[in-house]
Image (tube, rainbow, N blue to C red):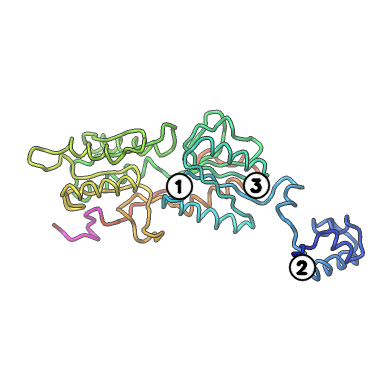
Amino acid sequence: MNAKKNPTMKDVAKAAGVSLGTVSNVINGVPVRKESREKVEKAIKALHYEVNAYAQGFRKSQTGLVALIIPEILNPFYSAFTDYVAEAVYAHDLKLLLCCSHELPEKEVAYLNLAKKSKVNGIIALTYSDIGDFISDNIPMVVFDRFFENHKIPRVGSDNFTGACLAVEKLLEFGCTHPVYIRFHSIFPGESDKRRDGYLYACKKYGLEPDYLDMVDQGNSEELLKRFLEDHKRPDGTLTFDGVFAHTDFHGYTFKKILERSGYRVPEDVQIIGFDGIGKFGHEDDLVISSICQPIRQLAEKCVESILQEDRASVPSLTLLPVTYRYGGTTRDPGKWPEA
């Protein structure tokens, strides 16, 4: 049995008794005689003809797609960001083309080429690779956190500097006397680098001795955190620090597990504040650890708003959104934790 073929524009034209050009004009909103338009609309309905929006987009300049390039989908922060971007894109009657690069430059370049060939309406990129030479100037693009020296691409991010200062201030407020900072970062510069600047500024402001682990992320963070812990043990086993500001929630959570396996209590012995605001199973009100929370939904919406802005010259080169501290069980928060 032969599969039933989907009706074509030719079928619609034949059923309506009009030319193929008339059908095309009706579909694309070009004015035609009322009688002809009604015939075409009646034929479309009778044949259950569906317009191929993707092909229609190729005949025009855009296909109604927004490309989102992210490093991975398993990271809860990226997952939440993706979900909110998809929601914002759909609200504008567009569709999302999701590209997961796994931080491989060649995959990011391939996705950039795919986006160009697909005539997407815009590109949102979370990239940690050197792909500046492969970015097209003809497609609206916004990057989260990163910047490229050879392109003037709008950036959207959080107020990382203020967030880092807030983390240190909260640790001091909750009784810490020596907060350290742990960071594993990309070799490429970005807005998140300002978290280190904020930590150092806060230390100077409050007369603290800076103490930090600051390494390029090479997949060996757990071993380096274990070594950092050993280097900060006194002969009696107590630690030289009582607070931790982690560059991300992921590394804060990893360090929490290392501390607990070594016999230290969190938050009784060591308090930890991360950065991102990752919720368990996607629930924003149930954090993995106490954190400086990025406004993920608002960041996603701002990225979509940026690439859809018709007047590209009016899009700010950098948009920073405010962050907030939220309790997640790893700090002795007076409002959430009993007094010692």
Crowd tier of the residue under label 1, counting other residues whose Cα lies within 10 Å: few below 14, some 14–19, many 20 or above = some
Which circle, 1 or 3, is nearer the viewer? 3
Q: Position of residue 5 (x, y in %)?
A: 77, 62
**What amino acid does circle 1 point to?**
Leu
Residue 245 is drawn in which quadrant?
A: top left
Q: Earlier in the sequence, mark 1 or mark 3?
A: 3
Instruction: Give the percent coordinates (x, y) of residue 170.
Output: 27, 48
Foreground of the two, 112 or 296? 112
Distance in Å between CA atoms under marks 3 and 2: 28 Å
Residue designated by label 1: 321
- Residue 133, which numbered label? none
The residue lying toward the viewer, choosing from 9 and 205, is 9
Residue at the spot 22% in from the left edge and 49% down from the top edge: 271
Provide the secondary structure element on which disc 3 rests.
loop
Q: Provide the residue designation for mark 3.
A: 121
Q: Is residue 105 above or below residue 290?
A: above
| Spatial separation of the CA atoms under disc 1 and disc 3 | 24 Å
Amino acid type indicated by mark 2: His
Residue that appears at 67% across and 51% down: 64
Q: Which residues are magenta?
A: 330-339
203 displayed left or right of 316: left
Q: Is residue 335 left or right of residue 130?
A: left
Quarter of the image with the N terminus is bottom right
Along the line of sight, the residue nearer the viewer: 54 or 41: 54
Q: Which residue is mark 2?
A: 48
